[in-house]
Image (spheres, rainbow, N blue to C red):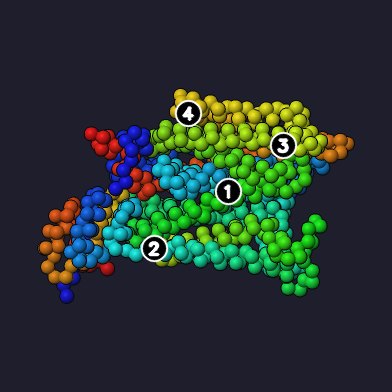
Amino acid sequence: MNKKVLYAIFDDEEILLKSVKELRSKDIAIEEVYSPFPVHGLDHALGFKETRMAITAFIYGCVGLAFGALLIYYIMISGVGKSWPMNIGGKPNWTFYHNFPAFVPIMFECTVLFAGHLMALTYFFRNQLYPGATTASPDPRTTDDKFLMEIVVDGDDKEMRKLLSDTGASEINEKDSNDK
Amino acid sequence: MHKESEIRDPLILGNKTYHDITRDIARPVEGKANKYWWILFGLSVFLFLWGVGCMAYTIGTGIGAWGLNKTVNWAWDITNFVWWIGIGHAGTLISAVLLLFRQKWRMAINRSAEAMTIFGVVQAGLFPLIHMGRPWLAYWVFPFPNEYGPLWQNFNSPLLWDVFAISTYLTVSTVFWYIGLIPDFAMIRDRMSKTISPMKKKLYTLLAFGWSGRAKHWQRFEEVSLVLAGLATPLVFSVHSIVSMDFATSIIPGWHTTIFPPYFVLGALFSGFAMVETLLIIMRKVVNLEAYITIKHIEYMNVIILFTGSLVGTAYITELFMAWYSGVAFEQYAFINRATGPYWWAYMAMMSCNVIIPQLYWIKKVRTSFIATFILSIFVNIGMWFERFVIIVTSLHRDFLPSSWTMFSPTFIDIGIFLGTIGFFFTLFLMYARTFPVVAQAELKTILKSSGSEYKNKSHE
């Protein structure tokens, strides 16, 4: 088939947003939108689901809390091969709950440590961001001041070009077929 | 679109477009350093190397190289440590707490404030490291499976809480900072194609992690920033609370007070904002960011300094009152000795720099002047150093037995290490100012239409 990839460039995020809404109302699939900054409301206009990053952070935080609690329990209360709890400065550690207040700071820090770092790693993983990755948007100007909408057209693209420029695209480029 | 009140002052001055913001932020990275940068950089590196020499001497000779004695067994090392940690606090407050409160003015200054945080915490970490005497065994502070007994850390001790709090703070702040930096590195990477520096382009391609600005990525970016801000907010309060517990859980009169955690946190924010101002007032001139870091930003920070400074003053007076009210002779003497003993001048420096001088910010002319703010911020930096010195040294130097009363004076090495950390801090900051996008330009572009002066005027017509 004769598939074409169109890159519509917009100068302003409000025009882009209007165009996205118009195209979506006509059931035209938008492949991707690249923008230099987060455009408010664009994720809803494109019909994205809510991101689950915050949920992962909550789960990682629970893991961190459990890790901190177990670590302290093992070291201070019931270490393997240890027949009595540590007694430091006349303050023995008979049970976990007796000493609980003194354990709160480190349990809290473990929660934040796990939640923060593991969420960041998940974010890098899901976005495929890593040192050495060379992916970039089709047009380098999209990190500066241009907004780019990527649309795949099957067959004749005249109508689509007209629609895009009617909704405010300042220029429309076609993906070079030699490009991968 | 978000609308801003018309009477609110603009946060971006001049007729800026999105492209202008890109150009202005990329300019220091793409351009050549001027003479002043090289002079400052040379001076900082010199101080840093001097500090390295003093640190090496300390490690080779032992802690006896410092002015410590049996009575005053903690002095400049911990003073400098608390001072640097405190300076680190404003960065996270600006980037995290102000994000949660949706304060738009944070966007022009959060990047540099966070850089200051990270560099400040690095300096702070050096002091416990060299105080250990054998810094190559520093990893012993972390719990790891071992065959020394097994030998474990004491999880009841605030010193171990410090280890966890500061390492969490340093690493989470760095991650938060870097996630925000990625889109801006990508902006610089994409501009590099027009210039001729393949090495630089390679470097920024590496740093940008392959960022492309897809809509889904931005959605995740915003969510991750918000959650990290939510995590960093209690973190920043926990860190200095825990630092204060190094003192508060002891039985030394003058240290053993429950007011310490909030008192230290406020003091940290107070000193942190002062250091942000000191740095930014210079930086906005050197790298031409006058349109982005405006007098309005400085005024907002001055209001916070005035507020936290007044609260710190309240804490000082509360401490005095509680000492008298407790009826404990040792406690009362500790505070009388602070104010009227041989270190009265340090107490006066603390009181005047932290409580009296910031009150000048009630005057609008003072708080909206760059020069006055710069001078006052230096006073606050000095005052907060003296606050820690007063708390630490004057509480120790006259302890329970008058026969062991003594004085503390720093040695050449003490001073050298402190100056060395200042040199190291400025070395890092100056390198940052030349190679990093110093303003979070992607975020700044989101407020151009609501807070840019040109757009504000248009909507007014």
**Going from the N terminus, do you reach mark 1 or mark 4 first?**
1
Q: Position of residue B409 (x, y in %)?
A: 75, 34
**Rendered image quadrant of residue B386:** top right
- Marks 3 and 1: which is nearer the front? 3
The residue labelled by disc 4 is B367
**Rendered image quadrant of residue B298:** top left
Residue B340, placed above or below residue B401: above
Q: State the mark number for residue B237.
A: 1
Do discs 2 and 1 share a chain? no
Q: Position of residue B264 (x, y in %)?
A: 63, 42
Badge 2 local density, few (<14 within 10 Å), some, or many (20+)?
A: some
Residue B206 seen in render: no
Q: State the mark number for residue B322.
A: 3
The foreground one among A92 and B438 is: A92
Furthest residue to the right?
A: B403
Label 4 vs label 2: CA separation?
42 Å
The residue labelled by disc 2 is A51
Amino acid type for the residue under numbered disc 2: Thr
